[in-house]
Amino acid sequence: MLIIGKITGFHGLGGEIKVPYSERLINNLNCLSQVYVFKTKSDYELLDITNFRIHKSNILIKFKQYSTKTDIEHLKGSLLKQKQENLAPLQEEEYFIKDLIGLNVYDQNETKIGIVNTLITETNSNDLIEITTLNNNISLIPFIEKFVTEVDIKNKRLRINTIPGLIDDEI
């Protein structure tokens, strides 16, 4: 199962949950009638989506099973998940985090730098790729075109443009 969102709060008294806005989540919700809501790794429920809408910087989602804010308060902090095969197809230059983890990272000179550990998405700016360098240091690389020039999932490669200080080993 893949995480598609996180419940951060509620809207009104009618039982709508708030999830931070993303185009990807909108695309997925357009394809889904149900979503898994995980309170913990083993405590989850499959809920029917009756509707969703955009409100400010959030997506508000209403579930058939809950009709009031009191009914859904226990879901705050829960993760929305779905099976990959039920999700909307990826657009060009979109990737699942699980597919990025473990990619070999090379610089613009084709020198291996390290391996991707994860993608950090909960930032106020750009997503960050966390890599472990060959010297076992951790470096964070903004996941933007200026730095990440190639993602090749098939060949397990990611190429970046480095600048002085970007990789801990360079300092």
Image: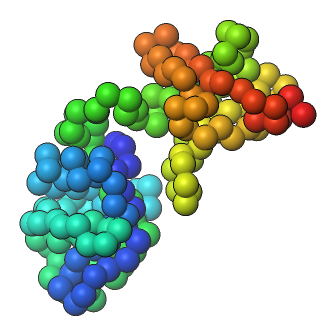
Q: Nearer the viewer, residue 95 or 108?
A: 108
Q: Nearer the viewer, residue 32 or 109?
A: 109
Quarter of the image where one finds residue 22: bottom left
Q: Position of residue 4 (x, y in %)?
A: 34, 51
Q: Quadrant of the C terminus?
A: top right
The residue under the point 24% across, 87% down is 12
Residue 150 placement, left or right of 28: right
Q: Quadrant of the N terminus?
A: top left
Report how many numbered discs are placed on residues in the image. Answer: 0
Residue 169 placement, left or right of 31: right
Quarter of the image where one finds residue 43: bottom left
The residue under the point 55% across, 60% down is 124
Residue 141 placement, left or right of 5: right
Q: Position of residue 16 (x, y in %)?
A: 22, 77
Q: Does residue 24 lie above or below 148 as drawn?
A: below
Q: Does residue 5 lie above or below 59 as drawn?
A: above
Q: Nearer the viewer, residue 66 or 109?
A: 109
Q: Position of residue 75 (x, y in %)?
A: 35, 73
Q: Does residue 167 lie above or below 56 as drawn?
A: above
The residue under the point 32% across, 80% down is 10
The residue under the point 19% across, 53% down is 29
Q: How is the image coloured?
A: rainbow
Could one spot residue 71 in this view of the protein? Answer: no
Q: Does residue 37 lie above or below 109 as drawn?
A: below
Could one spot residue 3 in this view of the protein? Answer: yes
Q: Residue furthest right?
A: 171
Q: Nearer the viewer, residue 146 or 75?
A: 146
